[in-house]
Image (cartoon, rainbow, N blue to C red):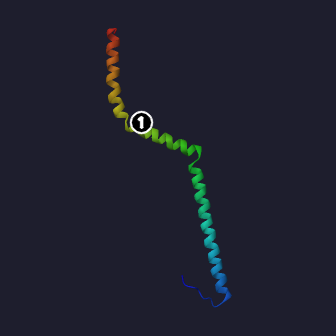
Amino acid sequence: MQTKKYSSYAQIDSELEIMKIEKEISYQKLVLSVQNTKESFSFFNITTNVLDTVKSTFFSSYGTILRLVIPIIIKWFKNKKRGN
């Protein structure tokens, strides 16, 4: 890294002000990141994610479940009708 040479105190003050603003921006980004992380671990978000996962898993296998269950139900009704 090269050493900067300043010709006046105004340049130094200007550079310090820029660095101070950059530091504040970085700090605010960190605060926002922590806040977003806290929100993602809230009860509502966790519950929503779990329910979405269960729903997508159930509906993706819905056809398979029906193909397995319908013959069993039909067989049960046939046996019930015969009295077995």
Label tally: 1
**Which quarter of the rendered picture does the N terminus lie within?**
bottom right
Label 1 sits on a secondary structure element that is helix
**Which quarter of the rendered picture does the C terminus lie within?**
top left
Q: Position of residue 55 (x, y in %)?
A: 45, 38
- Front residue of 2 and 11: 2
Amino acid type at image mark 1:
Phe
Q: Residue at x 32, y 18 (%)?
A: 75
Q: Count neighbours of disc 1 (C-alpha within 10 A) and say few if under 14, some if 14 to 19, many if 20 or more.
A: few
Q: Residue at x 35, y 12 (%)?
A: 80
Q: Is residue 21 above or below residue 14?
A: above
Q: Position of residue 24 (x, y in %)?
A: 64, 69
Q: Residue at x 68, y 87 (%)?
A: 9
Q: Residue at x 57, y 53 (%)?
A: 37
Q: Quadrant of residue 43?
A: top right
Residue where numbered disc 1 is placed = 58
Q: Quadrant of residue 13?
A: bottom right
Q: Position of residue 71 (x, y in %)?
A: 31, 23
Q: Is residue 21 above or below residue 64?
A: below
- Front residue of 4 and 75: 4
Q: Is residue 57 left or right of residue 27?
A: left
